[in-house]
Amino acid sequence: MDPAVSAVRLAVREAVHTLSSCEDGGRVLSTLESLKRYLGGAENPALAGEQEEFARAHFSAFLRCLVGRLSPGWLELVAGGALEELWASFFLEGPADQAFLVLMESVDGAAGPSFRLMKIARLLARFLSAGRMAAVMEGQCRRLTEPASPLLQETLLTQVVGLPDRLGNRLQRENLDAFLPQNYFPLLGEEIMRALQAVVVSLRDGWDCSVSFLSQVLGKACVHGRQKEMLGVLVPRLTALTQGSCLWQRVCWRLVARVPDRAVEALLTALVEAASGPEVLSRLLGSLVMKNKKAQFVMTRKLLFLQYRYSTPMLQSLLGYLAMDSQRRPLLVQALKALLETWGSSSAIRHAPLEQQRYLSKAVLICLAHLGEAELQDSRDELLASLMAGVKNRLDSSLPAVRRLGMIVAETASARLHPEGPPLRFQYEDDELSREMLALAAPQPAADSALEASPAVAPEPAETPGGGSVGGGVPQAPPEGSGSDLDSDDEFVPYDMSGDQELKRSKAPTYVRDCLEALTSSEDWERWEAALRALEGLVVRNPAAAREVSVELAKVLLHLEEKTSVEGFEGLRQRGLVAVVVTDPAPVAEYLTSQFYALNFSLRQRLDILDVLTLAAQELSRPGRLPRAPRCGPPGPAPLPSSPVAPAWRAVVEERIRSKTRRLSQGSVRRTQDAGPNQFNTVAGYFFFPLIQHFDRPLVTFDLLGEDHLVLGRLAHTLGALMYLAVNTSVAVPMGKALLEFVWTLRFHGDAYVRRGLLSAVSSVLLSVPAERLLADLPDELLEARPWLADVAERDADEDCRLLAVKALLLLEKLRDRLLPLASP
């Protein structure tokens, strides 16, 4: 046996025996100091072979002996804390990996909160603050000649990443701040940076190193959900270090490439979020997507199609990273093909949430902004086919937001994919979203500016209406024939014509029948317009005359077409129809509901019928309803007052009486609104039941259960509104039962707008039908609706549908809570 090995073994055996049995503080202290020479920190350190033998075969066992002797009495054998400091130095100066494993083993083996556990925990906190975790990881990076066993590396990996959980479980309320996850993982990121710096120094000195263990630590921490804490420290430091160093870039690429496959998604997602742009992401990742299939799937499929919670800058970084290198640009073209195919899929439009559709639309525009004409040329036909199919499907949607996304993407994509053709132009709302998406599609401006390159040229003076110029240029000569002695038109003040009215040759009709005649047979367009403007006021003022021709008036207005450019034509026609329905509800509502399912009507007319019925029902159900003055109409003679001018003396007398009258109550005088019966009560059935009766009967040109889902959604909303307006009426219960059957038939409809209408209808039933009648007459319907509402609130793709389902569930809970006290006795 080697004499050095036997000497170390004998010294350790004697030291362990002394520490285990001796109670003399001086002897214990001297024994520990004698063994300190094997760590290389004493005045006369041991030989290198002895230090290596001590570290390899005896250090862990000796540390376990030290932990076993830890007690208050043993530490007090030497006054002043000298023994405790010497005891701790073995853990802080010896081989870091063995010391760390012994400390974690001692934490796990300690029985509950105790003196020993707290001492070990505080020593472990000192171990972390002293930078010893970097030494643990650095030692694993340099083990190339004698690689550590896989079991040891796996144990180290588990202990390093799981330290906060283990210490939290053991210390409970006595946990230290250093072991909290929000403090520990940023510290771990700093330690990884120290280990990486040591690796770079070793590589520059010509020594081989491996970053596999660091990659495993980083990946495992990301899998545990600590990406932000770790990368919040690593990314800024690596961004600065890789900017001017190829060696640091290679080390960073290898660090990311050696991450296990199970952690690739978590790491890449966090990196794309933390990187400040595509240039930084390219320096950190290199061409990882070309070498790692899992990384390619995450970057080109999962982050684009399966996840949509990320911000627009992150999406720009991701797609910009693919566009920065010629080898990666084919992946960008493939991503654009898949994006356009998914963007235009009718199934995705129906079932994908609106947020995801916005996300896909932004991704399409960013891809188009990065790709050039040559790259789009090879795939132009395929991309145009997907685009046109998607535009058709989106314009067929009943949701305005979905249609607007189709318009914005179609305008931009068609200009890039088919520049020689006529450009597509749509009319849509100019809001923040549309401006953001159009900005994403704009190509990046060139670095140099034409204005900077061009010589300074004096701008031409802008001409003013008076013939002068604006700016510092030379004044122009006055035109020939002009002189300063001539009068100028600017001296005259313009006449105020803001109150003038256009003179009409045709006089406004005075009777309802005259309006009807003018609208049906008049060729005088001014008379036709005057009749349309006067109709609502005449119907309101002469209800008896309007009832005689009410159905005929409704028929004319329903088929009325705009023959001239009448301002506000749709509003005038709608208000006239509403006035006719309110004046004679039963026959007119019966006529309109019968025409809703008739042949040879456009979708616009059917939607107008629903709008008019809703507005008329709202007017009829208004409490204390009185005939209202027409909201618009031709200017007519005002009713004559009793005297031309109110006498001034009367106002003076009333003011004196008011000032000298003593009032006991100083509160404000309120006019109580006249109460009255709900006039919608007697006619609600004429509005409701014909509409809900034939919805499942397809016609040649009208199929509610087929392509006309926009009208079906509006019908569901209208039925819900009629149900809500029929509150406290005798017909509310049968209406509620019929409406719930209607909802139950269509509850799984694929269109989100239809589902919104159905959920609104359920809430209307719960609000309008009395609670006692709901449980007495509709118990089965309520039992069936509850699980369906819960499923919609949890799983529906549309956010508004989920919100409406939650509101309906809350109404059901309130209904149950209100009826439980009544049923308890």
Image: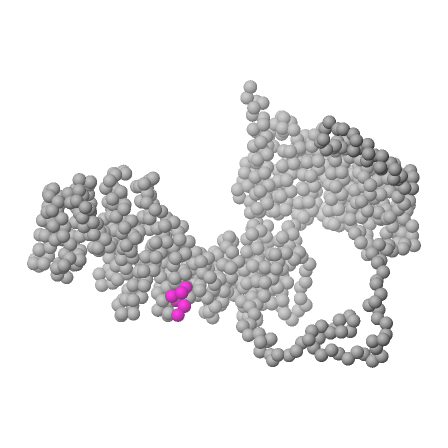
Q: Residue at x 51, y 53 (%)?
A: 308
Q: Is residue 250 magenta?
A: no
Instruction: Classify the position of the C terminus by image quarter.
Output: top right
Up the image or down, 824 lies above or below 193; here it is: above
Q: Residue at x 88, y 54 (%)?
A: 526
Please say whether residue 678 is visible from this viewpoint.
no
Q: Residue at x 70, y 30 (%)?
A: 728
| Observer-nearest of 139 and 483 | 483
The answer to which image quadrant residue 42 occupies is bottom left
| Observer-nearest of 42 and 782 | 42
| Observer-nearest of 250 and 180 | 180
| Observer-nearest of 508 and 645 | 645
Left or right side of 586 for 770: left
Left or right side of 504 for 571: left
The answer to which image quadrant residue 477 occupies is bottom right
Please say whether residue 419 is visible from this viewpoint.
yes
Residue 21 at what x, y percent from top left?
Answer: 11, 42
Q: Residue at x 77, y 43 (%)?
A: 595
Residue 810 at what x, y percent from top left?
Answer: 57, 35
Residue 193 at what x, y percent from top left?
Answer: 34, 60
The segment highlighted magenta reads 239-244
Left or right side of 272 for 732: right
